[in-house]
Amino acid sequence: LTTSSTSFNNNFKQQNNEIIELSNSINNLSLGENSEKCEKKVEVSTTIKTSIGRNSMTLVAHKPDKHVTNQIETANVPKSIQPRMWSLDNFEIGSPLGEGKFGRVYLAREKSSGYIIALKILFKRELHAANVEKQLRREVEIQSHLRHPNILRLFGYFYDDKRVYLILEYAAKGELYKKLRSCNRFTEKRASRYVNQMANALAYLHKKHVIHRDIKPENLLLGMNGELKIADFGWSVHAPNARRKTLCGTLDYLPPEMVEGREHDTRVDLWSLGVLCYEFLVGIPPFEDLTGYSATYKRIALVDLKIPDHISPEAQDLIVSLLQYDPNKRLPLDQVVNHPWILKYNRTESNGWEESES
């Protein structure tokens, strides 16, 4: 379910070279007016040492020090992206890649190496107003320690008086949600490969005792080779022992135990994987009800599932196996990747696959 450090490094360097070629059309990258909106004087962020291991997570926070760099894990990180006293002077900032509730994401190039990255710029004012500072910190603590080809890398972060900057892996082929909307629904071959990659990524997260809790197309990106990458960990939590009870995530993807206010664990992600598989193949979530939220809640609680006839029996079987009311009856991830519908389209291992495949 994981790749070796050597192969990960080689793949990263190879893909970065391809990304640079792809980005030659962005030779007009310059700080220009984009950077004028950002402060250049940057303090280093609070040092955080996080251990997402078999037993626990330990957080040791130190006061900011002008002479201390961010302490993030350096395994598999290109030398040019190793921890340092980051500032905007280290990057050339190009065109916007996307816009969110709290800021924007820009294409950027690390000057000393030419590495292409995505720079996410969040406004502290908006973060404070929405009371999500702790949520952001938890997201950074978790994502910066994850190493998997189907999980977007977070290389580091820094901040100034007004903004927080996240240094992210650049997913060259953009948002999966837009691809899905443009073609309405995916072929079974394409959907099967995405579900296989998701299952591998979730198995890795669960081994690290991380529950994602917000799996949906909007939180997924596509890498240079069309490989899927989980890109948003805003609702993720590290829970090695305790079960959780917080209602979070996106309504259409919530499992029965969440909508009913019961405790939940990693198996909420199995339900969400089933919903995701359905939406890939049908184009809409299975329990969506346009009459209102309460109707959707009711359909989820009753597992009111209706699968169109055009879905193959094998795909239907996987969806039904994941969308079980009882979390104990949901198909485990190690069985998901060995399900006949998955094996049918994923017989050869690959770090990615071309998006043009039918």
Image (tube, helix red, strand yellow):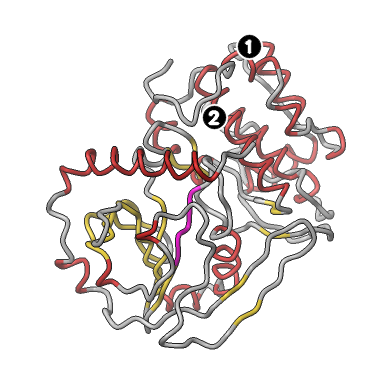
Q: Nearer the viewer, residue 355 or 286?
A: 355
Relative to 269, is 357 on the left or the right? left
- Residue 139 lies left or right of residue 338; in this view the side is left
The residue singled out by tag 2 in the image is: 194
For disc 2, the neighbor class at 10 Å (few under 14, some 14 to 19, many from 20) is many
Question: Residue at 66% across / 48% down in the picture?
Answer: 205
Quarter-of-image position of residue 243: bottom right
Position of residue 283 measured from the top left corner of the image (x, y, whole percent): 51, 28
Q: Residue at x 69, y 40 (%)?
A: 203
**Does residue 153 belong to the magenta stretch?**
yes
Residue at the farthest front position: 6
Q: Is residue 51 left or right of residue 158?
A: right
Q: Which is in the foreground here, disc 1 or disc 2?
A: 2
Q: Quadrant of the C terminus?
A: top left
Kindly identify the residue that appears in the image at 73 percent across and 53 percent down.
209
Question: Quick check: 45 above or below 73?
Answer: below
Q: Quadrant of the N terminus?
A: top right
Distance in Å between CA atoms under marks 1 and 2 = 17 Å
Q: Amino acid at mark 1?
A: Ser
Q: Residue flagged by tag 2: what amino acid is it?
A: Tyr
Which comes before the other along the chain, label 1 or label 2? Answer: 2
Give yes or no for contact between labels 1 and 2 (Cβ–Cβ under 8 Å): no
Q: Which residues are magenta?
A: 152-156
Q: Position of residue 158 (x, y in %)?
A: 41, 73
What is the x, y in percent for residue 68? Answer: 46, 82
Secondary structure found at label 1: loop
Q: Residues within 10 Å of mark 1 (few under 14, many from 20)?
A: few
Indicate which disc residue 312 carries.
1
Nearer to the camera, 209 or 83: 83
Label 2 sits on a secondary structure element that is helix
- Residue 161: x and y in percent read 37, 84
